[in-house]
Structures are given as structure tokens and as C-alpha cells.
Amino acid sequence: RNLVLITSGGTTVPLEKNTVRFLDNFSTGSRGSISAEYFLEQGYAVVFMHREVSDCPYACSPRLIPLNSYLCRLFNLYRKADEEGTLLQLGFTSVHEYLFMLKHVCQALQPAGERAMIYLAAAVSDYFIPDHLMEEHKIQSGSDNLNICLTPTPKCLSLLKKTWCPRAVVVSFKLETDESILMKKATGAIEKYKVDCVVANILKKRFDEVCLAVATCVNDGG
């Protein structure tokens, strides 16, 4: 059976180790959860690595389908996946948890070789605060301005193809607000990180239109 790891939803950036405040993004995880449903219907075993409290497979809002028939269909599909053991759901919240989990799940999929796919639909924070720079306790309020120094989040895409799961097909996502740089960014990710495909879209068109950038040679993962 073919395997796919789907990452979904946004990651938080804690401002304190005992977290009270954090930075977040607006991702709901709907694209990742709906994608998981399609992969399950195509016979894949799915590891669904998602943001806690984000959308999950068979739990999204119905669209253009009568509610009763929609719910019955979802229940039957979910029961089928549960009985067959083809859906494993793993939750994360912070970008630190996401990076740790991504590494270990990808390494666990390595024996599957070309039968594995890594489908990176999560909206991962571009910047974070390393542990050694983070406040231990809640940042106290006061009259002074709060200055936060953020560090670029480590890029893991190249590690996926080099070390963690080198024979898997890797699909990444790129969201931009400037259409003029979208495809340059997408093709650049293929060249720099050696991913097999980039799903690219513009913020204001993200529900209606996507562009695909595909590497010239892609493993046949099924």
C-alpha cells in the first residue's frame, strides 16, 4: 500500500517557555484535511500530522451536498478508514513540535521508499524564537514597548530529500500575495530543495486557483 504523510494547519510561535502569548497565522487546515480524504479514497494509508483544533478528515463543513447524505457518506468513509487502520492522526501546536515530529515521522517512512509521499500542506511559521532566547515565564506588561527578535525557522525541505526520506515524492506548498513572483518562488524551491512538486497560489485566489511547478524527473509513488 502507498503511504502519504500530510501536514496540515498552522504553527504557533511561543513567546515564552511557559506559554501565555504566541504568534499565529490564519490557516484552518481545510486543504490538508480534504486532501487526506482524497488520498484515503485512492487507497493510500495516511499519516495526518495536523495542528490541534484545526480541520481533520471527514470533519470539514459540507459544501453543495444535502446535509444528511453528506454526513452519512463521511461516517461511512471514516469508519472504513478506521477499520482498515489507514488513517493515523498526530497533533502539534508550536513550530518546535512540528519540526520535531516531521523529522521523526519522515524517518519512520523511509523504509517505504518510493511508495511514500510527503505532502507538506501545513502553514509553517517563517520565523521563531529559539529556546535559549525565549523568556521562561510570562512576559510582564508595562508602559515600555515590547521588542521581539525572531530568527528564521530552519529549512527542512532539503533534509527530506537528502537524509530523512530520500526516495519519497515530496510535494510542498507556496503561498504569496505578489503574483509576479509566485512561479519564480515555486521553481526556485524545486531547484534549491529538490522537491518534486510545488503547489503555488495567491492569497486572494487560494480557494479558486492553484499553479503547479513540477520537477523534470519525479519518482513514481503511485
Image (cartoon, helix red, strand yellow):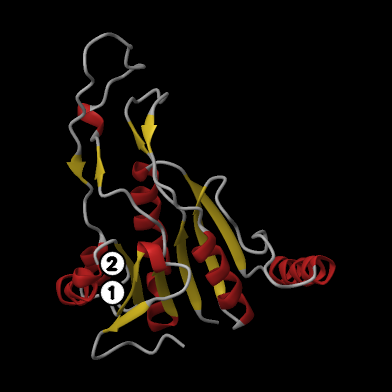
How far is disc 2 from disc 1 in space, using C-alphas?
6 Å
Quadrant of image for the N terminus: bottom right
Q: Nearer the viewer, residue 2 or 129?
A: 129
Q: Is residue 179 left or right of residue 19?
A: left
Q: Name the spot of residue 132 as percent of width and height, x first.
A: 21, 28
* Residue 166's disc number: 1
| Residue bearing the label numbered 2 | 160
For label 1, count other residues whose C-alpha is less than 10 Å away and answer few (under 14), some (14-19) or many (20+). Answer: some
Which quadrant of the view contains residue 123?
bottom left
What residue is at 64 percent from the left and 60 percent from the top? 60
Q: Name the spot of residue 192 as percent of width and height, x first.
A: 15, 71
Q: Is residue 59 left or right of residue 148?
A: right
Q: Say what amino acid the circle numbered 2 marks.
A: Leu
- Badge 2 vs badge 1, beta-carbon distance below 8 Å: yes
Q: Nearer the viewer, residue 132 or 138?
A: 138
Res. 120 in view: no
